[in-house]
Amino acid sequence: MDMNTLLQIIVQVIAGVIGGQAVGAALKTAAMGQLTKILGGALGGVGGAAILGSLLGGGTIDPAAAAAATGGLGSALNVQNILGGAGGGAILTAIIGAVMNATKK
């Protein structure tokens, strides 16, 4: 695994955790612990970014030009990694919260 791929996964995980924490804070009725929100957000972030990346066809930014402009982070900091990660993390965390609430009733 090269460094560029690793940076993309790190950005996806961080964005997913942020999305999961946001949903966890918004859904006060969902009795989820921190670990559940973090893991759900991280897994959802990687999955959401992968799905969005396949739908967008790899994005619209030239990775070589973006990497040169931002010192190596350009191909990792793109729309599919950030928005797909945050959205996927939020969605998966919301699903986990709904399932946990349904099993408690």
Image (spheres, grey):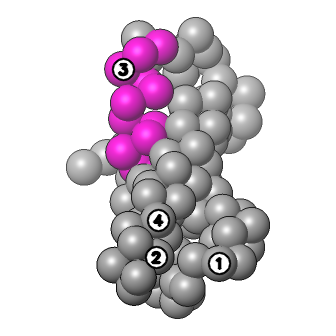
Circle 2 residue: 101
The percent position of residue 59, horizontal first and vertical second, equals 52, 16
What secondary structure do most residues of the magenta stretch adopt?
helix
Q: CA distance from mark 3 to mark 4?
A: 27 Å
Circle 4 residue: 98
Q: Is residue 64 above or below residue 2?
A: above
Circle 1 residue: 29
- Does residue 9 appear left or right of residue 84 in this picture? left
Q: Quadrant of residue 84?
A: top right
Q: Residue at x 38, y 30 (%)?
A: 51
The percent position of residue 7, horizontal first and vertical second, equals 48, 51
**Numbered circle sitting on residue 54:** 3
Is residue 20 something that shows in the picture? yes
Q: Residue furthest front?
A: 105
Tag nearer the camera, 3 or 4: 4
The local crowd at label 2, few if under 14, some if 14 to 19, many if 20 or more residues have their Cα within 10 Å, is: some
